Amino acid sequence: MTGGYFEIEKISGGYGSGRVVRDVSISIGRGEVVCLLGRNGVGKSTLAKLACGFLRPLSGAVRLAGHEITGARPSENLAVGLTYCPQERVVFDDLTVAENLSLMRANRRLDDLDRYFQVFPRLSERLRQHAGTLSGGEKKLLSLVRGLAEGSDMIVIDEPTEGVQFENVVRMAELIVARKNAGASFLVVEQNLTLVDRIADRIVIMDHGEVVLSAAASEVDREDILTHLTV
C-alpha cells in the first residue's frame, strides 16, 4: 500500500498480547476525510490508539508523509504533525479551558482562536473555568478545538459527537471541512451519520477487528452502513 499521506498497513494489536485489531490497512490522502464506522467493541478506538502511538502494534506499519512512525510516542507523533483527539479523557479536568487550549502552544496566546470561539461561543465564555466542570458535550467541543488549533496536517478524532447537540455537530462538520479544504487530512471514528454525511470522502467499516468495507462515501449504501451499526 503506497501513495497515502497517512498509511496504516496491516496493523495488528490490542492490549498486552491480545489482538483486537487484525491486519487492518487504511490509506488517507492529503486533504481527505476518512470516516471509520462499526459497532461498539469492534476495534475502532483500539486502531486509532495503535496508529497514534498510545498502543504499540504487534505487527504492521504506520507512516506519515512517507516516514515510518510505527510505535513512536504520542509526543513524537505530535511533533511531526499527527494530532489525536481521544474518545475518553478528552480534556485535562484540573486545568482551565484556556489552559487546555494553550497547553501545547509556545506563546500560550489564544488570539488566533477567535474563529473557533465565534463558532462555539460557550468556550470563550468559560475560559477561566476548570474544564472538569463542563458538560460532556462541551468537553468534546473543547477537545476538537484544541486538536484543530494544534495545526497538524493529520488529525485523528475518536467519537467527537458523543453528547454534542445537533447544531454543534453541524458546526463541527463545517470546521472539519474547512480544515480539509486547507489541506489537512482526517481519520474520524464515528457513528453519528449526521457528521459522516457532511464530512466523509471515504468510509471504512470494521467488524470483529477487521475491515469489512472500504469505499468512496458516494458509493456506500446507507443500508450497508446501518447493517454494520446495528446489533
Image (spheres, rainbow, N blue to C red):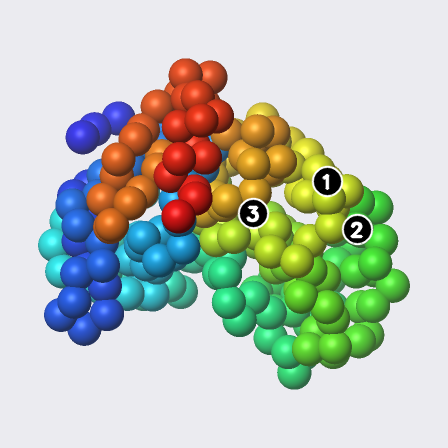
Instruction: Tell me: 11 left or right of 90.
Output: left
Q: Distance between the residues labelled 1 and 3?
A: 19 Å
Q: How far apart are marks 1 and 2 (CA)?
A: 8 Å
Q: Residue at x 60, y 75 (%)?
A: 92
Mark 3 closeness class: few <14, some 14–19, many ≥20 residues within 10 Å: some
Q: Measuring from the top left, give residue 49's x and y in whole percent.
A: 35, 59
The residue that mark 2 highlights is 120
Q: Distance between the residues labelled 3 and 2?
A: 18 Å
Q: Measuring from the top left, give residue 11's x and y in whole percent.
A: 19, 49
Q: Is there CB contact under 8 Å for labels 1 and 2?
A: yes
Instruction: Point out which mark residue 44 bears.
Output: none
Q: Measuring from the top left, give residue 27's x and y in whole percent.
A: 30, 33
The residue that mark 1 highlights is 171
The residue that mark 3 highlights is 151
Q: Which residue is drawn at 46% across and 17% down?
A: 218
Report whether residue 34 is seen.
Answer: no
Determine whether the residue tagged by mark 3 lies in a helix, strand or loop: loop
Q: Residue at x 74, y 71 (%)?
A: 134
Determine whether the residue tagged by mark 1 lies in a helix, strand or loop: helix
Q: Which amino acid does the dot numbered 1 rest on?
A: Arg
